[in-house]
Each structure stands twice: as structure tokens, then as C-alpha cells.
Image (spheres, coloured by chain):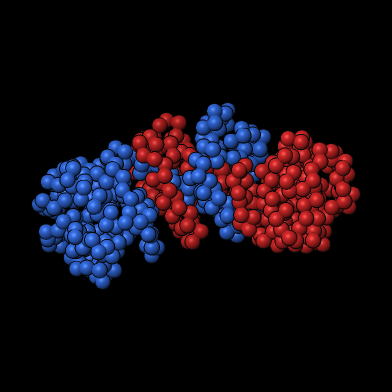
Chain colours: A red, B blue
Amino acid sequence: VIHISIIGTGNVATHLAQAIAQSPLLRLDCVYGRSEEKLEPFKELTSTITSLNKIQNTGLLIVAITDDELKTMPDKIAVGDILTVHTSGSVSMRVFEKFERYGVFYPLQTFTAGRKIDVKKIPFCLEAKNKKDLEILKTVTQALGANHFVVNSEQRAKLHLAAVYANNFVNGILAEAKTLCEASGLPFKILRPLVEETFEKVFKIGPENAQTGPARRGDHETIKKQVAALPMDQKKLYIEITNSILRRYERKEL
Amino acid sequence: VIHISIIGTGNVATHLAQAIAQSPLLRLDCVYGRSEEKLEPFKELTSTITSLNKIQNTGLLIVAITDDELKTMPDKIAVGDILTVHTSGSVSMRVFEKFERYGVFYPLQTFTAGRKIDVKKIPFCLEAKNKKDLEILKTVTQALGANHFVVNSEQRAKLHLAAVYANNFVNGILAEAKTLCEASGLPFKILRPLVEETFEKVFKIGPENAQTGPARRGDHETIKKQVAALPMDQKKLYIEITNSILRRYERKEL
């Protein structure tokens, strides 16, 4: 049984704490938070503390705080020889180089308060200063029933950017689609089967093979008509996405 | 039983022909195509013809051809009093105004050769010159086990544009994500759980509530870092999508 403590009370901390508490191969020792109020949801899972000085010996310390907070955190706490990892997509492992044993435990997923995520569907990106510690992180992901990938800090930064596209940007495009859909007087849900098929196709045959539409065909006449039909403030977005597709298929850009 | 004939041999024609042939409440009379070769896949379903003059009396004629071909088609064929519909998202119903009875039968879905789509998951957008004919189109979608929406030509043009975002543009963004992912040396499938959760969240809580990331937070510092990390030809796309999200949340644009 691996003993784990968590620093942080946000969405990542909450989801990890629940998953760790449920695993028979792991034990959640303690959760640190800034206030008793923020620790409330954790109290049914384990003991909680509001002072960093009180972090006791534990097998693994997971630091799930914001990127900004991560920068100053190593100055505020002594972890001794406890293996300490952060969960950030974009912060280098070296932020912890003051520590004896350190690494990264990055869950490649989007977490929302109040929404349960099956921990088995989280790919964990692992990195550690020492080989032995990497093995400990692998064991933890296995105990959670999740998949892991060994990813260094440079790879992780690129992967995190890919995740911005796959999550934030796809969501942003679907927000535009919803606006256009509702402008036509139809409910957004009418697009659901199309979006579902879009996602299935992307992972079945690859986005480069699944691409259809006027940009894929290089059909500049239809593209012009569609740009003309858009409200002023939406034209630039349409044009840049269309250019990215035209470019991909080596066609003339707008 | 409603008798149906189809003009066209593309992906829409293929998927519709299969679904119609399988319904006990519909009968597929005939499929027209330009060549015997293109008609090959239809021959196991029904009789096929290569001359438009041979279109016999049928209950409903579905014209599933390209937008360009649609423009000249009414001059090339006499349909008499057969209810004639096209399947285009962007062409007005009036393209058929020479005909006695006409309408639109637009399947809001993306069709790919060799990929089966459950017809029950296609929302059909229906429009007809006469009320009675609209009822016939509703009966056909019911016989297919599919949902229908009554959508006029103006609404349909906007909806079609929404579909370009939901399908073509989301696919284009995921192609960029794949490129970034593979540049980090990791397989595209590592993003699948994230994309799946993105999609589920969008339709559960709406894209406006599901949005996260630096643009949602108005975090210009992180945005600048990410733009700097991108290859030159990808910066503009990143900036325009980010601007569209910043705009949506009334934050300062780049």
C-alpha cells in the first residue's frame, strides 16, 4: 500500500483524492488546503490540515495547485525525502529541483466541479528525477486502474498545447456552432449526432482522412458565400480555420 | 408503403438507399446514376438506370447530387407530379420551383464511403411547398426510424453553416492537435479521453459553461507563452480562436 498526501483543493485535487481513497492499494493520508471551508469536501475522505508545517511522512506528495503557486511553493515547505510531484501540464519538473526526490503526475483530462470522471479514462503523464521514483508513479497509476505514458517536461509542454486545441479550442468552435444554430431558430441538440460522428471518425480514420467540406475541396466559391453570410466579428475566425485546412491540403489560401 | 426513387450515387445516395431498402414501410423503386460502374453498389438493392428519361412513376424522388448539379437538373428532367426533394444543406427549395410538387430532405450528418451510420441518428430537416407533401416527408423519416425537424430554406442555410463549424472546423482543429501531439512524440490516441469528455460536457452543460483554459480566464501571460511556442504558420489560427473565446467572455482581445 502506497501512502499519499495531497496539497490543493481544486478540481484536480478533488478528483484525485476521491480516486485514491477508493483504491484498496493506496491510502490517502492527508489533504492540505488554505481554509477549513475549502477542505470541507475532503473531510469525509481523510484528515485535513491548513498548515504546511504539519505534512507528515508520507509515500508520495501530490501538489495540485496553480502554475503560479507552483513557482513559490518549494520555498514554503520542507518535504525532506518524500517523493513530491506536481500535476501541471506546462510547468517543468525542475520547479522542484530543490527537493531530493521529485517528478510530475499530469492527468491529461479536463476536470469540472460536480462532474464525475472515470479515473480509468485518464491518461497519466509521468516523469521523475530518479528511475525508482518513476516506478512508484507507475504503480500508483496501475493501482488507480489508469493508463500511463512516460513524458518528459519538453514533450509535456507540447502535449499540453495539443490539449488546449483538443479541449479549449474545440469547445470554443462548438460555442460558435451553437450561436449559429440558435440564430437559425433550431436547438443546439440537433447538431449532437453530427458532432458524435465527427469525433468517432477522427479517432477511427484520423482527422486528415476524415476532413470534408469546402476547404478540403478547395471550393473557394462556397467559402466566399459562407464568409459573406457570417456576422462581421465571426469572419476572421472562419477565414483562419479555413486557411489552416487549405494549407494542410496544399491548396491556395484565402 | 411509400415508393421512392433516387437520383445520385454519392455518399448520401448510398446511405439513404440502404436505409430505404431496409425499411418494411418503404420501397426503393429505382436508382439513377451516370454510369453502370457507379451504380454497381446499388444493384443488389433495386433496379438501376443511366437515363433520366426512364424515371417512372414513383411516390418520392430524392435528388442527392452536388449543389452545382442541382442548378441545372430541373432543365434536364420532367418529373410530372412526382414529389421531388433535394438533400442539400445550402440550396434553396426554390431551385425546384419549375416542378409541381417539391421540397427538401436534408440529412444533418456527415457521410463517408465505407462507414455505416445508424439512420436513427440522422436528424432530417424537412421542407415542402405543400402541407400534404410535408406530411409525406415526415412519414418517410418515421419509417426510417429517424427524427425530423421542419426547417425552411433560410434556417437551413444557417444550420448548414453551423454544421460546417461542428464538423469541418472541429475536425480541422483536431488535425492541428494531432500534429502538435505527434510533434511531442506521443500518439494521437492519448488525446481521445480528453476529446470524449469535451464532447460529453458540451452537450451536458453547454459549451458556454464548459469552456476552460487561458482564454476563458483572460490569462494573457499564458496565451503569449503558447503563441510563442507555436510554429509561425500556426500562430494566426491560435490567435483568432483565442480572440473568439476572449470576445465571448467580454475580455480584452489580443
Residue A225 visible in the picture: no
Q: Position of residue B112 (x, y in %)?
A: 38, 59
Task: Please give left or right for residue A93 compared with residue B106 in the image.
Answer: right
Quadrant containing the N terminus of chain A is bottom right
Q: Residue at x 76, y 58 (%)?
A: A26
Q: Residue furthest left?
A: B80
Would you place residue A225 above or below residue A132 in this image? above
Which residue is at the front of the view, B156 or B169? B156
Q: Position of residue A108 (x, y in %)?
A: 64, 51
Which residue is at the front of the view, B85 or B175? B85
Q: How many marks?
A: 0
Q: Residue at x 73, y 35 (%)?
A: A37
Which residue is at the front of the view, A42 or B25? A42
Q: Position of residue B251 (x, y in %)?
A: 57, 28
Quadrant containing the C terminus of chain A is top left
Q: Residue at x 50, y 44 (%)?
A: B204
Q: Residue furthest bottom?
A: B44
Task: Please give left or right for residue A205 compared with residue B110 in the image.
Answer: right
Residue A237 visible in the picture: yes
* Figure quadrant of residue B17: bottom left
Q: Residue at x 67, y 51 (%)?
A: A107
Task: Please give left or right for residue B224 compared with residue B88 in the image.
Answer: right
Task: Please give left or right for residue A220 compared with residue B100 in the image.
Answer: right
